[in-house]
Image: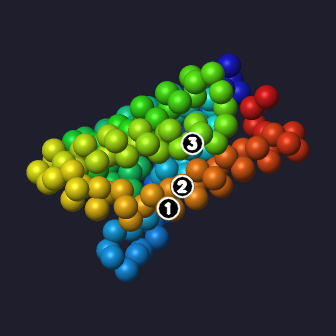
Amino acid sequence: MKNKITLLGLFTAFLIVTSWIKIPTPFGIPFTLQVFGVILTIYFLKKDAWKAVLIYILLGAIGLPVFAGFGGGISVIFGPTGGYIIGFLLATLVAYLPFENIINGFLAIAIIYIFGITGLIFKLDISLIKAINIGFLPFILFDSLKVILGYYTYKLTQKYEIGIIK
């Protein structure tokens, strides 16, 4: 039990740090490593991943600056990008699938994008096409690379028996 609590704390901290890392782009929308954090949390914590993501969301909801760009507060969750944050939590459900492979990561980002794009549509009052253009297309290639990197990072730790969860 003590080990599990420690892991939840570590992965919650990992989610926070990956949210803070921002890479500027020429088209003005920065990339973060949040999706990478969520994917690794799912691969390593499996069915407990939702707990770390929920703690992360609750910390942000009470106002701690844990979200992208050091954002915090319930207004972020109810803002235009809040759908992505909710998607992070719902993406952890892929850990309950009867298989564990790279497809889990791609299903997770599909869930994140479905909720993120839906949030953009409703909060910004824009069309589906515009939401896809601003909230999906600029990010899908890099998020796919994050899934691949996350999966192979997880597999490598298992291969050399240095995984944190056995």
Disc 3 crowd, CA 10 A, few/some/many (<14, 14-19, 20+): many
Going by the numbered disc 1, the residue's amino acid type is: Leu
> Do the residues under discs 1 and 2 have CB atoms within 8 angstroms?
yes
Going by the numbered disc 3, the residue's amino acid type is: Gly
Quadrant holding the C terminus? top right
162 or 123, which is in the foreground?
123
Q: How many badges with numbers are in the image?
A: 3
Disc 2 crowd, CA 10 A, few/some/many (<14, 14-19, 20+): some
- Helix, strand or loop at mark 1: helix
Seen at 49% across and 50% down, the residue is 35
> Which circle's residue, 1 or 3, is located before the other in the chain?
3
Q: CA distance from mark 1 to mark 2?
A: 5 Å
- Helix, strand or loop at mark 2: helix
In the rendering, which numbered label is found on residue 84?
none
Q: Position of residue 85 (x, y in %)?
A: 36, 43
In the rendering, which numbered label is found on residue 105?
3
Disc 1 crowd, CA 10 A, few/some/many (<14, 14-19, 20+): few
Seen at 28% across and 62% down, the residue is 134
Task: Write down the residue under mark 2.
Answer: 144
Seen at 25% across and 43% down, the residue is 118
Side of 134 relative to 10 (left or right): left
Q: Position of residue 11 (x, y in %)?
A: 59, 41
In the rendering, which numbered label is found on residue 141?
1
Up-down relation of residue 9 to residue 120 (above or below): above
